[in-house]
Image (cartoon, grey):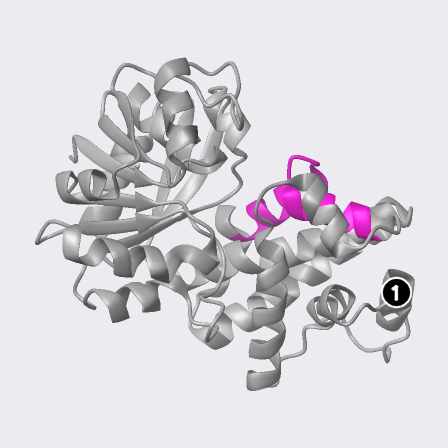
């Protein structure tokens, strides 16, 4: 089993994963791009900005030197926003060890072309590079607080996924493995779009019935796109599909849901994003999912209306009415 790991990205999720690995006795090196932020982490031995009052284990070190973490770790776990994912790979490529293994907890598509992130890794490195994606119903604060959690680690390389599962699993954290790297990524990306939609509905005061309908019909949209791209339908009924969808649509720890709430309450997108103050992956994912649906002629009406609210200034009330006015048909 891997006994050391480098984690790239010192936000809430990257820090939580670093704490989890270090608690399990793994030598862990966490990198962040902001030197001042890293100095605070080193001095405080906690991430006061994102995960206050959670002490770093002794096995966790932090650095602002990307070459240090990239060159010293055979296993790298990337936790940066999707728009920075490819640039991060290009930067670390000349720095990494020869047989590096790359995992990521980033959720979303590559903004330039709508590719899934494992395809970007294959372009920058090699299709033979061991890759894995972490996804599922996880809030960083609850992982850091050592609350019971389960998630999925997907990889075509079963040895690598098993290594990561062993590294991250504990008496309070259960890692399931999967070979469906496509399905797990699609579920993790589209659920953020649907969380914005659910937040909008709740911001408009439309009630629990509406929220339940959005989650259920939203799952159908995930399945439609995911199976078109090569994912397995059963994946979307598991932790990385339905589980993550329920989590982000129903709890205000979700930034995407909070954005939707603000939009439903009449705030504009930029104002709401500024108040949240962290990356909101569902915004870019809505655009990429909308374009993919058009490309493959897939019906994704909730995604389409969410895209129009975000990018075409559609009144959220009109978006809801557009969904209700659609032609009646059988559910399945």
152 left or right of 60 in image = right
Q: Residue, x 26% and y 71% (percent of image)?
A: 123
Relative to 176, say whether 235 is above or below.
Answer: below
Quarter location, residue 179? bottom left
Q: Residue, x 25% and y 29% (percent of image)?
A: 28
The residue identified by callout 1 is 315
Relative to 185, say whether 137 is above or below.
Answer: above
Q: Residue, x 25% and y 44% (percent of image)?
A: 76
Instruction: Characterize the magenta stretch by its predominant secondary structure.
Output: helix
Disc 1 is placed on an element classified as loop
Question: x and y percent of residue 206 in the render?
Answer: 90, 50
Question: x and y percent of residue 70 in the render?
Answer: 20, 44
Question: x and y percent of residue 209 in the render?
Answer: 86, 49
Q: Nearer the viewer, residue 149 or 124?
A: 124
Task: Tell me if mark 1 has few (under 14), some (14-19) or many (20+) residues whose alpha carbon lies within 10 angstroms of its own.
Answer: some
Quarter location, residue 66? top left
The boundaries of the magenta stretch are: 241-263
Q: Nearer the viewer, residue 235 or 48?
A: 48
132 left or right of 282 in image = left
Relative to 71, say whether 140 is above or below.
Answer: above
Is residue 243 on the magenta stretch? yes
């Amino acid at each position: 089993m891997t006994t050391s790991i480098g984690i790239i990205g010192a936000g809430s999720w990257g820090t939580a994963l670093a704490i989890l690995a270090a608690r399990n006795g793994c030598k862990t090196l966490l990198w962040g791009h902001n030197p001042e932020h890293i100095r605070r982490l080193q001095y405080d031995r906690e991430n006061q900005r994102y995960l206050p009052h959670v002490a770093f284990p002794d096995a966790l070190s932090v650095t602002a030197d990307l070459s240090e973490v990239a060159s010293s770790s055979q296993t790298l776990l990337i936790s940066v926003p999707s728009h920075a994912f490819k640039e991060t790979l290009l930067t670390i490529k000349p720095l990494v060890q020869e047989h590096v293994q790359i995992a990521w907890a980033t959720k979303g598509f590559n903004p330039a072309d709508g590719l899934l992130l494992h395809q970007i890794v294959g372009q920058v490195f090699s299709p033979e590079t061991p890759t894995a994606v972490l996804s599922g119903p996880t809030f960083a604060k609850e992982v850091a607080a050592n609350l019971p959690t389960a998630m999925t680690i997907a990889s075509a390389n079963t040895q690598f996924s098993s290594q990561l599962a062993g590294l991250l699993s504990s008496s309070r954290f259960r890692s399931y493995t999967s070979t469906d790297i496509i399905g797990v990524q699609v579920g993790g990306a589209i659920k953020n779009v649907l969380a914005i939609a659910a937040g909008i509905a709740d911001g408009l005061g439309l009630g629990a019935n509406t929220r339940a309908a959005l989650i259920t019909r939203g799952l159908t949209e995930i399945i439609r796109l995911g199976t078109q791209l090569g994912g397995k339908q059963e994946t979307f009924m598991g932790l990385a599909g339905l589980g993550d969808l329920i989590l982000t649509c129903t709890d205000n720890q979700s930034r995407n849901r909070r954005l939707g709430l603000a939009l439903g309450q009449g705030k504009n997108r930029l104002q709401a994003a500024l108040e949240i103050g962290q990356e909101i992956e569902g915004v870019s994912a809505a655009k990429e999912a909308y374009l993919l649906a058009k490309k493959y002629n897939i019906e994704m009406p909730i995604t389409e209306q969410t895209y129009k609210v975000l990018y075409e200034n559609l009144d959220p009330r009109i978006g809801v009415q557009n969904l209700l006015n659609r032609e009646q048909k059988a559910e399945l």
